[in-house]
Image (cartoon, rainbow, N blue to C red):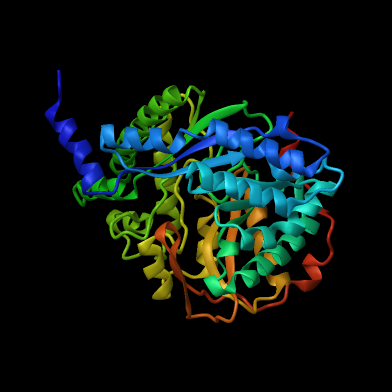
Amino acid sequence: MIDEYNIIETINMIKLHNLDIRTVTLALSLRDCISEDINRLCDNIYKKITKYAQNLVPYAEELSDEYSIPIINKRISVTPISIIGEACKKPDYIKIAKTLDQAAQEVGVNFVGGFSALVEKGFTKGDRLLIDSIPEALAQTEKICSSVNVASSKSGINMDAVLKMSETIKEAARLTKDRDGIGAAKLVVFCNVPGDNPFMAGAFCGIGEPECALNVGVSGPGVVRAAVQSLNEKADMSELANKIKETAFKITSTGELIGRKLSKRLNIPFGVIDLSLAPTPAVGDSVAGIFQSMGLEHAGAHGTTAALAMLNDAVKKGGIMASSHVGGLSGAFIPVSEDAGMIEAAQNGYLRFDKLEAMTSVCSVGLDMIAIPGDTPTDTIAGIIADEMAIGMINKKTTAVRIIPAAGKKAGDSVYYGGLLGSAPVMKINNLSSTKFVQRGGRIPAPIHSLNN
């Protein structure tokens, strides 16, 4: 029997509260593209991507029209390129990046993720060459995203990699200073990176992944906010959590439907649903707005971390009941530039850098899309990365840093990217020196609970 209420509710989720499929991401292994010859490697990469992804965009748009559900981004993630390129006699990672970009242009996707390296325990030759090439690769391409995993709960924190990435971030921002440092906005540093994440800039096709798979990222902060607002103001925390769980179930069910339909049309396996609440700069589509609906005056008020912890947990519990294959990051994102409420909180001084760091202990990712003064020393950036990696390592969770040292800008200025990347105020950071600590190098040992096998 058709339930009229459920039909109307779904329509309202889409039309009034910004429910969407944030991304469908084709994860594609490039391991069979490896060659000693760089030209042959690039040719193999181009042919494989254009073969497997040729119908991704048109089929996704067909489904979007059929079900009247917006599918915002179509993306590709590939095997970490540091692995793919290091077999060449004369590796040229810039050439590989440009090949990926050309293939992305050809099939019409928004981004390609996987210009990546996994260095939590140390570097290979290919890792070093790739990391050295990241700033130039991001400056010379439009659709490439890059990520580097520098820590894990099993291996500890590679402080040599942390320091190297702080230099890389600053150079990526410098080379794209005419675009407010957008190179750094497409670069993320991870602890405990997942290999099936469909969201950029951290998506790549992990070593344990199949030849290809379709991973789906759903989103709906506006839907959750509306659901919370529908409750009586005297509803207790258990009622609040249950309402969020019910809503997350509905959001995830929508993503599961679209993901399975699209994977069937593409004739590739369905991978995972990433049920992260990914906000946008649109009014009403804000994780910070959910906090206000819960009863906080604004994001940044005392109680914000507790509210985020409950939100994250309820989203996971609701989503896991709607799909047997939940993966990726799955939780609540708190990117400053991509969330209208977070932008407002940062501009008004309600949300400071230290509070954001505290919130990352319970959120889905970490310090995300935060602009900082362009003259911030690389050692200070390394200290910021090390702190965030420590939160992930100790808590056995994924954490990340995506910050933009905006060249020529100081605290109180703004950066603007448009689209989903939005805009952000340049935030003030602690000016105390981290130099002697981060310059020690080496590896911070893994915690005792890593010995759990």
72 lies left or right of 163: left
Q: Quadrant of residue 196?
A: top right
Residue 167 visible to an observer of this rendering:
yes
314 lies left or right of 372: left
Q: Quadrant of residue 22?
A: top left
**The one of 152 and 14 positioned closer to us in this rendering:** 14
425 lies left or right of 391: left
Vertical arrangement, residue 165 with respect to residue 266, above or below: below
Residue at the right extreme of this rendering: 89
Vertical arrangement, residue 343 with respect to residue 255, above or below: below
Q: Residue at 39% of width from left, 32% of height from top?
A: 59
Residue 444 visible to an observer of this rendering:
no
**The one of 252 and 45 positioned closer to us in this rendering:** 45
Residue 237 x %, y %: 32, 45
Residue 217 x %, y %: 44, 40
265 lies left or right of 383: left
**The one of 335 and 395 positioned closer to us in this rendering:** 335
Residue 208 x %, y %: 67, 29
Residue 234 x %, y %: 21, 50
Quadrant into which the C terminus falls:
top right
